[in-house]
Amino acid sequence: MNDLITKECTIHLHKKVYGVKLKKKAPKAIKKIKLFAEKMMRTKDVRIDTKLNKHIWSKGIRHVPFRVRV
């Protein structure tokens, strides 16, 4: 049974990457989004869409958007 389930949530990334070194903020944000999705959907198979990845990296490695609607 391979049903795709979708849920919309807002992730407060600023809280999740606060205190992380500047050069590691965007990669850490991607990891936190994956972890959040694993908890919400109760699955290990989580894939980040290219549009979401580009949005996270849009301001560079140091400046991650405060919130992301996923």
Image (cartoon, helix red, strand yellow):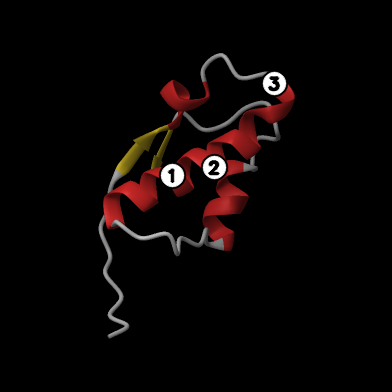
* Residue 11, numbered circle: none
The residue indicated by pointer 1 is 35
Disc 3 versus disc 2: nearer the observer: 2
* Residue 31, numbered circle: 2
Please count the marks in the image: 3
- Asked which quadrant contains residue 58, the reply is top right
Residue 70 in view of the camera: no
Residue name at image x 47 percent, y 49 percent: 34
Q: Residues within 10 Å of mark 2 (few under 14, many from 20)?
A: few
* Vertical position of residue 27 compared to residue 4: above or below: above
Label 1 is placed on what type of residue? Leu
Q: Earlier in the sequence, mark 3 or mark 2?
A: 3
Side of 27 where 39 appears, left or right: left
The residue indicated by pointer 3 is 22
Are the residues tagged 2 and 1 within 8 Å (C-beta)? yes
Callout 3 secondary element: helix
Are the residues tagged 1 and 3 within 8 Å (C-beta)? no
Label 2 is placed on what type of residue? Lys
